[in-house]
């Protein structure tokens, strides 16, 4: 085996592991951020603004995790696309890449709105609830995250499952499960406040699957050319 072949073999070994590590980091960070924020920011609070008085620190901690989760997600997206390589369908690859970036941008936007609410209350606690800015910001934040970001997450999942089905780089049962979970995010009208946990949970599942199959050397370490013959 020459130096080029050894380098290629090492890259085939490292790429799925890098994707799995990035996916696990994203799932843990994004999931922790959702838990902290949702536990602090109820959908229908009994006393408006009480969560700002009692849980501002916890909300700020959750929001501080979102940028790092976004970095891990970009790493995860890039490594997964690199693994599929030339066998990636351009149509679904464009949808995969675009929906992934839109999900990330919308998540950042929702987090920025939540951070703006916390910051505005910290600076102007006496005047904060006097106008409509609080209600507008809070409703917009929920709409962006629960409707638009989750729809983009569903599209990302469907395009991923389709690429897996075509290239056979992931188990078929995982592709079928991905279609099912994606349809839930795409079709449900009123999302549960905890519904966004579906996406990081899904990323965690496929990341663990990648690690397990890579460790066994039965799926992810095989060249795609051999799988498609």
Image: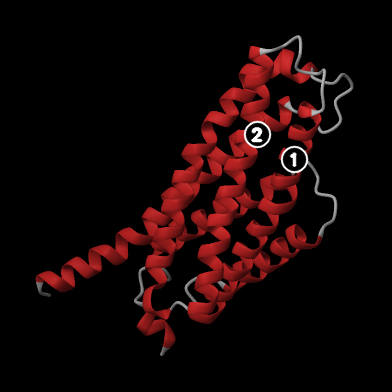
- Reading the image, the residue beneath label 1 is 140
- Residue found farthest to the bottom: 229
How is the rendered protein coloured?
Answer: secondary structure
- Reading the image, the residue beneath label 2 is 113
Q: Residue at x 24, y 68 (%)?
A: 9
Asked if labels 1 and 2 touch by Cβ distance under 8 angstroms, the answer is yes
**Left or right of 72 on screen, residue 120:** right
Residue 205 seen in this snapshot: no
Q: Residue at x 85, y 50 (%)?
A: 190
The secondary element bearing badge 2 is classed as helix
Quick one: quadrant of the N terminus? bottom left
142, 133: nearer the viewer: 133
- Residue found farthest to the right: 46
Q: Residue at x 63, y 27 (%)?
A: 116
Q: Residue at x 58, y 55 (%)?
A: 102
**Residue 148, disc:** none
Quick one: quadrant of the C terminus? bottom left
The secondary element bearing badge 1 is classed as helix
């Amino acid at each position: 085996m020459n130096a080029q072949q050894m380098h290629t073999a090492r890259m085939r070994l490292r790429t799925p592991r890098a994707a799995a590590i990035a996916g696990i980091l994203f799932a843990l960070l994004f999931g922790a951020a959702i838990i902290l924020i949702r536990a602090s920011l109820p959908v229908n609070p009994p006393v408006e603004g009480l969560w700002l008085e009692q849980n501002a620190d916890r909300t700020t901690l959750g929001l501080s995790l979102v940028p790092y989760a976004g970095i891990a997600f970009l790493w995860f997206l890039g490594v997964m696309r690199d693994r599929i390589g030339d066998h990636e369908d351009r149509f679904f690859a464009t949808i995969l890449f675009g929906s992934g970036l839109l999900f990330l941008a919308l998540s950042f936007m929702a987090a920025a709105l939540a951070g703006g609410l916390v910051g505005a209350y910290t600076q102007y606690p006496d005047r904060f609830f006097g106008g409509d800015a609080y209600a507008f910001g809070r409703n917009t934040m929920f709409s962006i995250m629960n409707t638009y970001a989750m729809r983009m997450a569903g599209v990302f999942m469907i395009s991923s499952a389709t690429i897996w089905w075509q290239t056979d780089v992931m188990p078929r049962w995982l592709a079928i499960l991905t279609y099912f979970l994606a349809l839930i995010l795409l079709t449900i009208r009123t999302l549960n406040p905890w519904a966004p946990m579906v996406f990081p949970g899904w990323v965690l599942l496929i990341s663990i699957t990648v690690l397990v199959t890579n460790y066994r050397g039965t799926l992810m370490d095989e060249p795609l050319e051999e799988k498609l013959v």
